[in-house]
């Protein structure tokens, strides 16, 4: 479950980064960074080797998608 | 419309106009449009969180009082038979839930409600009243292949493969329910952002690119 949350929260961060009207630093911290930190803590606490690999693959996929969307 | 007169250093004015010309050409109203845009960014950057923000990346920031209304419309269009609400809870909160609800699961520190579509909003409202789940940053709502991940306090991101046309239907109906006039057809705008600075303000529509 924490992997799905991690991907969701990371997507949320990536989408916010693409906004023309970026919200306040406090919004970024409370709504995006803190939830991701919680997910990563869960992963560190209870994740298997496979979970770590899946986490990196999932985050990498989100990054690739965002970079692809940015291309003209 | 208000009229604003300001003093700018000559160099800044020159650079500002050069960027405007490169973006909009020398069209009438371009200076006003760019100035409005700069002021709006400054307002948001300096602490005024929009009352409402939705964009075509399916990123949503809505006022906490409107979350249930948004979810009701969202669930109608996604049309999933089963809906799962999950969130992180303390031991005290789990004890409280046990006294009120019969069916739920606990996995690690997460509480999971697997619901019929008909029970979704009622249960969400109950959990909001009892535990304030609507403000929890661990809130996640799953509808088959699509899920909403929360950052807390009305900040959501739609994950999964939701067609943009379907999302636009949700946004259009949600704006109608708020009695906010939407003067454009969202399907004709690829990279839109919709902003309300307060409940009574006019909808601000901007577009990337």
Image (spheres, coloured by chain):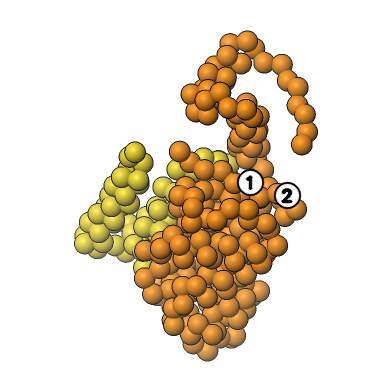
- Supply the letter of whichever chain is yellow: A
- Supply the letter of whichever chain is orange: B
Circle 2 SS class? loop
Looking at the rendering, which quadrant does residue B96 occupy?
Answer: bottom right
Residue B181 - label: none
Disc 2 to disc 1: CB gap under 8 Å: yes
Residue B155, image x, y percentages:
55, 56
Task: Please determine whether, in this image, residue A7 is positioned above or below residue B201.
Answer: below
Residue B204 - label: 1
Residue A19, image x, y percentages:
49, 43
Residue B201 - label: 2
| Quadrant occupied by the C terminus of chain B | top left
Q: Residue furthest right?
A: B2
Neighbours of disc 1 within 10 Å: few (<14), some (14-19), many (20+): few
Decide if residue B147 is in sight here: yes
Q: Foreground: A64 or B130? A: A64
Q: Foreground: B151 or B208? A: B208
At x 56%, y 23%, the residue is B26
At x 50%, y 82%, the residue is B117
Looking at the rendering, which quadrant does residue B81 occupy?
Answer: bottom left
């Amino acid at each position: 479950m924490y992997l799905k949350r991690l991907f969701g929260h990371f997507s949320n961060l990536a989408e916010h980064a693409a906004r023309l009207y970026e919200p306040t630093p406090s919004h970024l911290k409370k709504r995006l960074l803190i939830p991701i930190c919680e997910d990563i803590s869960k992963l560190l606490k209870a994740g298997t080797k496979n979970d770590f690999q899946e986490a990196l693959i999932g985050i990498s996929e989100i990054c690739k998608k965002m970079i692809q969307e940015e291309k003209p | 419309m208000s009229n604003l007169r300001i003093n700018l250093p000559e160099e800044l004015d020159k650079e500002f106009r050069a960027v405007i010309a490169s973006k909009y050409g020398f069209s009438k109203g371009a200076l006003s449009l760019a100035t409005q845009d700069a002021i709006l960014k400054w307002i948001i950057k300096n602490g005024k969180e929009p009352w409402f923000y939705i964009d075509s990346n399916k990123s949503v920031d809505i006022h906490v009082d409107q979350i249930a209304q948004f979810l009701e419309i969202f669930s109608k269009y996604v049309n999933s038979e089963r809906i799962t609400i999950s969130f992180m809870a303390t031991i005290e909160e789990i004890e409280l839930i046990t006294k009120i609800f019969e069916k739920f699961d606990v996995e690690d520190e997460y509480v999971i409600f697997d619901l019929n579509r008909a029970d979704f909003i009622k249960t969400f409202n109950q959990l909001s009243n009892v535990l304030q789940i609507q403000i929890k940053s661990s809130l996640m709502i799953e509808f088959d292949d699509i899920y909403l991940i929360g950052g807390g306090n009305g900040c959501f991101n739609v994950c999964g493969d939701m067609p943009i046309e379907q999302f636009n239907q949700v946004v259009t109906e949600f704006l109608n329910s708020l009695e906010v006039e939407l003067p454009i057809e969202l399907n004709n705008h690829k990279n839109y952002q919709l902003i309300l600075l307060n409940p009574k303000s006019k909808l601000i529509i901007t577009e990337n690119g």
